[in-house]
């Protein structure tokens, strides 16, 4: 059979069209596979990214709540920190379930390990703050009790020790002791607000002055009432105040040290999750 030129041209175009259709079929199939792969990737990567983002939100939330609790002792911030901790582990479990590569799983493990250290510091800070509050309250209550006791004893010396040659000197010492005790409370509060070494020095200077005044008082001839109040009650209380202030300052130092570590670790976790 002899093909004409027109037939050959038509056959050529038919062949081109056929090859084009085959190519389009392959392209369409490839696009379908790409679309499927992209969809599968989106189904994994988007929730994975969302889980990482939620963990970052929880960590930043805990950082904020703990620091606010340190400053205010508002129980709301403690409760929010505990809720953020619970939420974090929920999103971390989801992240690990969605992780498909070795790198993703390794990152998830590193995030979990770092977070455990972060939360341990958070719990320690909350605990230290509660202990500090209790210790400070004990110091202030004891200072107030001794202030009342000194005032009452001074009134007794004024009204009942009129024949005592040292009456005036005793009254002066009791007044000075009362003033120094007030200064102890003042500088203790100042040091808590701002840990200036000078404030700490003044705090212990004032406490030493209280002890010196009590020792000076005992140089006079003392009545039975003097001995009971000055030597036994006040002397014992001042030693307790000294010990309790030491505990307050120790807790305050621990909070400041742990607080900085807590902030540094939060920044490290933030970088991991970026």
Image (cartoon, helix red, strand yellow):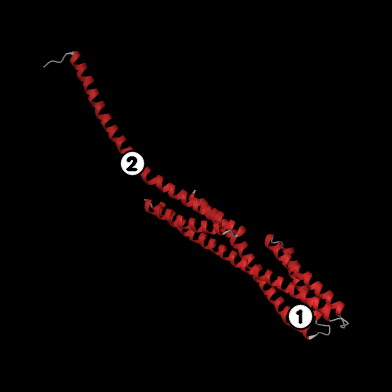
Q: Can residue 245 be seen in this view?
A: no
Image position of 226 (left or right of 191): right
Q: How far apart are marks 2 and 1 (CA)?
A: 86 Å
Asked if 173 appears above or below 22 in the picture, the reply is below
Say whether residue 32 is left or right of residue 140: left
Q: Which residue is pictured at 16% across the width and 13% down the height? A: 4
Relative vertical location of residue 260 with respect to residue 10 in this rendering, above or below: below
Secondary element type, mark 2: helix
Q: Disc 1 designates what residue? A: 230
In the picture, residue 168 is in which quadrant? bottom right
Q: Quadrant for the N terminus, please.
A: top left
* Residue 37 marker: 2
180 or 36: nearer the viewer: 180
Residue lying at 59% horizontally and 65% vertically, measured from the top left: 130
Quarter assignment of residue 125: bottom right
Q: Position of residue 48 (x, y in %)?
A: 41, 48
Going 63% across and 69% down the picture, which residue do you hit? 135
Residue 263 spot, x, y in % from top left: 57, 56
* Most distant residue in the front direction: 159
Residue 46 is situated, as x and y percent measured from the top left of the image, at 40, 44
């Amino acid at each position: 059979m002899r093909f004409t030129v027109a037939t050959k041209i038509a056959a050529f175009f038919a062949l081109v069209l056929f090859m084009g259709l085959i190519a389009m079929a392959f392209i369409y199939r490839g696009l379908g596979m790409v679309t499927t792969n992209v969809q599968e990737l989106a189904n994994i990567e988007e929730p994975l990214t969302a889980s990482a983002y939620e963990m970052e939100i929880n960590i930043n939330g805990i950082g904020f709540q703990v620091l606010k609790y340190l400053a205010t002792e508002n129980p709301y911030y403690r409760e929010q920190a505990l809720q953020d901790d619970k939420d974090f582990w929920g999103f971390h479990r989801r992240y690990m379930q969605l992780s498909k590569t070795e790198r993703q799983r390794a990152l998830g493990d590193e995030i979990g390990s770092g977070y455990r250290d972060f939360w341990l510091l958070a719990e320690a800070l909350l605990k230290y703050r509660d202990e500090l509050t209790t210790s400070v309250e004990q110091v202030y209550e004891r200072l107030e009790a001794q202030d009342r006791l000194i005032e009452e004893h001074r009134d007794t010396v004024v009204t009942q020790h009129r024949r005592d040659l040292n009456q005036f000197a005793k009254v002066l010492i009791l007044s000075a002791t009362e003033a120094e005790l007030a200064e102890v409370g003042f500088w203790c509060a100042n040091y808590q607000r701002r840990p200036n070494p000078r404030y700490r020095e003044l705090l212990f200077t004032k406490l030493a002055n209280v002890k010196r005044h009590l020792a000076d008082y005992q140089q006079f001839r003392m009545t039975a009432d003097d001995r009971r109040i000055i030597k036994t009650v006040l002397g014992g209380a001042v030693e307790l105040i000294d010990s309790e202030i030491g505990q307050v300052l120790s807790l305050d130092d621990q909070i400041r040290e742990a607080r900085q570590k807590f902030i540094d670790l939060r920044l490290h976790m933030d970088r991991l999750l970026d």
